Each structure stands twice: as C-alpha cells, then as structure tokens.
Amino acid sequence: AQSVAQPEDQVNVAEGNPLTVKCTYSVSGNPYLFWYVQYPNRGLQFLLKYITGDNLVKGSYGFEAEFNKSQTSFHLKKPSALVSDSALYFCAVRAGYSSASKIIFGSGTRLSIRP
Amino acid sequence: GAVVSQHPSRVICKSGTSVKIECRSLDFQATTMFWYRQFPKQSLMLMATSNEGSKATYEQGVEKDKFLINHASLTLSTLTVTSAHPEDSSFYICSATVAGGPRDEQYFGPGTRLTVT
C-alpha cells in the first residue's frame, strides 16, 4: 500500500532563511509524489510533482523538492522563506499510474514564517 | 489551469436534515471525481471516488447510505449528507480529473464548510 509520512507537525523559520518540510514515502512500484499547500478555510493548491526524470523538481512560488530514492524521501525546500509562505503543507502520493488513481495525503505540516 | 468549483462554500443545517454539496469542473470534462473530508487540523481523508455514469466507490468506513454521491454528468458531481448530525460537521473538498496518464492532474475545489447544529 502507498503511504507518506510527514514527521513534523510544525516548522518554524525566520523570514529570509531557507526552509525544509520533510516527507518520506512508501510505495510499491513507481512513485508519483506531490506537494500541496492549503491556506485557512481554502482548498488545496498544487505546488509540484515528481513523476519521473530529474530528482530536483521545481514548482510554484519558488518551492522545489528533491526526490531521493535511496532515502525514500521527497522533502520540500525553499531557499528564502517569506511570511506569506505560512500555511499548511501536504505531501501526497498517488496510488497508481493514472491521474484517476486516488491520492493519499500525509498528515500535514504547518509552516510558520516569522518576520 | 483547470478550475473546479464547489457550492455552497459554507452551509449550516439543523441536525436531521439533508444537505447537498455540488462540485463542478468549469472548463474541462471530468471523468472521475473524488470527495474528501477534512476535520480541523487534520489531513484530507478520501471518502469516495465517482466515475461519470456509474456508482461511486466508497472507502472503508464511509457509509454509502449516509453520503450519497451522484456523478450524473462530466462536469457535475454531488455529495448529499443525509440526516446530518453534528459529527458530520467538517470541511468537504472535491477534486476532478480527466482519467489520463501520470502527468495529468487532479484539480481541487475550494471546499465546503458544513456545520450541523
């Protein structure tokens, strides 16, 4: 069965500093990995995905994620955090090849950027 | 990018009544739609998967008679919470996709906040 784990409930970073939000995955077969962001009382916004190819994936709002097969990790990173990055971040894995396969979400990490 | 809407964005209903939530794909035809529930400060839990013109597939532990899903057209799926109770209060989010290859996306709606009093 496919699953993702986000070991940190909360990450606190000062504005301007680099940030990392951790995610590890467990899949049978090829991994299809995603990061989404959720602002209060809002739906999900897609940040980036790994399907195949380069291990470093670049996404929206300056975020990137590094796929590491040996460590089964897909950590989300940004070189310089903004206060507006404060939100809830979800790592997710898709259960199959097709876009119609269900997506399984991690528990979420609340990112707080202090001015 | 593709847009998915939900209506209403917020609804308050009395215990014992039923409430319908709509999910629409505005600029594409969605062969598959998903319904999720999110409790405060928790992750999204998949409730069911629906394909246009066929019965929804429910996740384990989700009562199909309580959460009625209809995917009558390629642009509309509805979730009806029947005989709602306060414990059904939650944030309901839908997503939609054209069933395609791995590079295709699921697109998420903005969510519906249901409060049952």
Image (tube, helix red, strand yellow):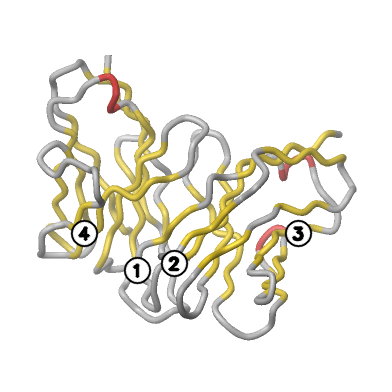
Which residue bears the numbered disc 3?
Answer: A77
Q: CA distance from mark 3 to mark 1?
A: 26 Å
Which residue bears the numbered disc 2?
Answer: A94
Disc 1 element: loop
Which residue bears the numbered disc 1?
Answer: A101
Q: Position of residue B46 (x, y in %)?
A: 34, 50
Task: Identify which amino acid the numbered label 1 is placed on.
Answer: Ser
Q: CA distance from mark 4 to mark 2?
A: 16 Å
Q: Position of residue A10 (x, y in %)?
A: 69, 38
User: CB atoms at circles 2 and 1 under 8 Å apart?
Assistant: yes
Q: In percent of the image, x 71 and y 52: which residue is there?
A: A21
The number of numbered discs placed on residues in the rendered structure image is 4
Which residue bears the numbered disc 4?
Answer: B50
**Residues at discs 4 and 2 both on one chain:** no
Q: CA distance from mark 4 to mark 3?
A: 34 Å
Answer with left or right where residue A39 lies relative to residue B38: right
Q: CA distance from mark 4 to mark 1?
A: 11 Å
Q: In percent of the image, x 25 and y 52: which residue is there?
A: B59
Q: Quadrant of residue A103?
A: bottom left
Disc 3 element: strand
Q: Is residue B94 above or below residue A103?
A: above
| Subunit that carries the residue with mark 2 | A
